[in-house]
Image (cartoon, helix red, strand yellow):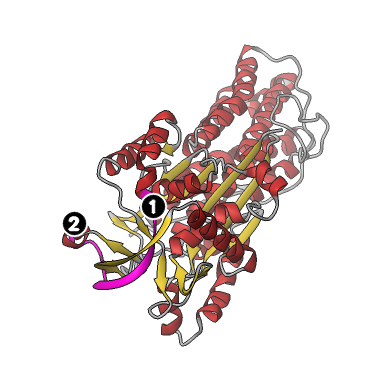
Amino acid sequence: MSKFFVTTPIYYVNDAPHIGHAYTTILADVLSRYHRTVGDEVFFLTGLDEHGQKVKQAAEKRGLSPQAHCDDLAPRFLNLWKTLDIRYDDFIRTTQERHKKIVQLCLQQVHDNGDIYSDEYEGWYSVAEERFITDTEYESGQFRDVKKLKEKNYFFKMSKYQQRLIDYIQAHPGFIRPEHRKNEMLGFLRQPLGDLCISRPKARMDWGIEIPFDKDYVTYVWFDALVNYISVPGYGSDEVKFKKWWPADVHLIGKDILTTHSIYWTTMLFSLGLPLPETIFAHGWWLIGETKMSKSLGNVVNPLDLTNTYGVDAVRYYLMREMVLGLDANFTPDSFIKCFNSDLANDFGNLLNRVSGLIQKNHGGQIPQPGDLTAVEQDIKQQADSLSGRIKDLINEFKVQEAVSSTLDFVRILNKYMETQAPWKLAKTDMKAANRVLYTAAEGLRIATIMLAPVMPEKTAAVLSILGAENTRPSWGQLRPGTALQAHPPLFPRIEVEKP
C-alpha cells in the first residue's frame, strides 16, 4: 500500500473564509479521495495560522484578545469545510500546545546547529507582509503599510543553504510545479540570498510563540506556520508516525506564497536535517474579471452563497473543472451557470435520466441483461476500461481539470451512443438489442460516476444508489442484471436564466 500525504496552507484567521480558501481545500480533498479510491493510505492536513501582527490587529479592531478572535473565527472555517464535504484527517491551529512545543524544539535545534544569530538591523518593514523588505521592493511601491525600523533581532542563516537549494531544484524536476514556477524560483536564487529575520521583540509585537533561548522575543509567524507540516505528523513527538508520513507528497499552495515554501521552508528543513517534500505545487488565483479576489477590493465570492443556491457538488465540480492547475481562472456567474447546465444538467444528469427512464418504461425498472456485445459496445467497454488508468495518471500529474474533462468526454460518448442506437426504437422490434444498449449505457454511467466521486461525493453516491451499485469498482461488468432501479428526482435541474 502506498501513502499519500497532502497539505493545504494554513489560513490566516484575520477574516472569514472565501472562495480562494475553499478552492485549495477542495482540491486537497479531491486528490485525497482519488488516492483513497486506488487503495492508497492518505493523510490530509489543513488548519489555521493564528499568530502574527495581522491577526493581532484584526483582533484589536474587534475589541477582542487575539485568542478570543481566533476562537471565534476558527469554527467558521471548520463549518465551511463540513458544508463543502471536505474530509481532512487533521486540523491544526497554531495556538495549540502540540504545535507550539515543536516550533520551540525546531528553533532550539536550528540554533544549536549554529544557524541562528542575533544582529541589529535597520530597514523597511512591511506590516501587511509582516517582514522586512529590500530597498528595491520598497521602491517598487507594491508593499502597503511600510515603515522604517531599527531593532535587534534573530536571523536564520538562509544564505548558507542557497547553493544547496539551487542544486536540489535542478536535480529534482518535479519538486516545484508547474515548470514556470520552478524557473521563477531559480531566477530568484540567481541573486544573493539574504538571511531571514525570524524574531519579533515582544515590546513591539507579543502575539506569537516565545523563542526558547530568549524570552524577550516571539518567533516570526512564517517560521511558526511552516513547522505545522512536520509538527502534526509527529516530528519530535511520534517517531514512528513521522517516519511513516514524512516527506509530504505535495504541499498545495497559492502562487503568492511560493517563495516562503520553496525557499524559507526548504532551507529550514536543510538545517533540521530533514528530507524536503516531494512536490510544492503553486496553483493560480481565482479572478473576478482580471482582478485577484480580495477583501479590500470587495470582490470576494462567498462559496456558501453558491452552495446554498446550487448545491455543494455543483460548486466543487465547477472549481475543479474550470481551473487548470498552475494558471489563473476567472469566476463569473455566467461561467458557473454555463458549466452547470452543459456538463451537469445536459450531459451527466441527462444520461442518468434517459437510462433510468427507459429502463423503467420498457424493462420493468430492472437492469437488463447485457447479452452479446457488438463491436460498438466492445469499443465503449474498452474506453471505460482505459478511463480509470488514464484518470490515475492524470491525478498523479496533478491534472485534475483534465481528469474531470476526460470523464465528461466519456459521458458525452455514452449520450451519443444512446442517440445513435435509439433503444426506445429497438424496444419495439428487438428487445435483446434494446437490453444490450441500455446495459452498456448504464454500466458506462456507473464507471463514469465512480471516476467523478472524488469531485462530487454526494451526487455520485446518489447515482450509485439508484443503480444498486454502491460498493462497486471501476471495472466493466459489475452492474448486476435484475437489480431494481431506485426512483429519483432530476440529478441537476437546469438553471433557467431569464432573458433580458
- Please report whichever mark, 2 or 1, sits nearer to the chain's N-terminal start: 2
Residue visible at 33% across and 42% down in the picture: 185
Query: Which of 40 and 344 lies nearest the eye of the viewer?
Result: 40
| Callout 1 secondary element | loop
Which quadrant is home to the N terminus?
top right
Residue that badge 1 annotates = 157
Q: Nearer the viewer, mark 2 or mark 1?
A: 1
Query: In the image, residue 149 lies at what x, y percent?
Result: 26, 72
Which quadrant is home to the C terminus?
bottom left
Mark 2 closeness class: few <14, some 14–19, many ≥20 residues within 10 Å = few
| Quarter holding residue 119 | bottom left
In the image, residue 372 sits, relative to residue 11, either above or below, namely: above
Q: CA distance from mark 2 to mark 1?
A: 21 Å
The answer to whether residue 453 is visible is: no
Report the side of 350 relative to 193 (left or right).
right
| Quarter holding residue 99 | bottom right
Question: Which residues lie in the magenta part?
Answer: 140-158
Q: Is residue 154 magenta?
A: yes
Query: In the image, residue 226 lies at what x, y percent?
Result: 49, 56
**Residue type, label 1:** Lys
Task: Using the image, tell me which numbered label, if any, was put on residue 136.
Answer: 2
The answer to whether residue 290 is visible is: yes
**Residue type, label 2:** Thr
Query: Which of 166 and 260 lies nearest the eye of the viewer?
Result: 166
Residue visible at 40% across and 78% down in the picture: 57
| Callout 2 secondary element | helix
Query: Which of 47 and 298 lies nearest the eye of the viewer?
Result: 47
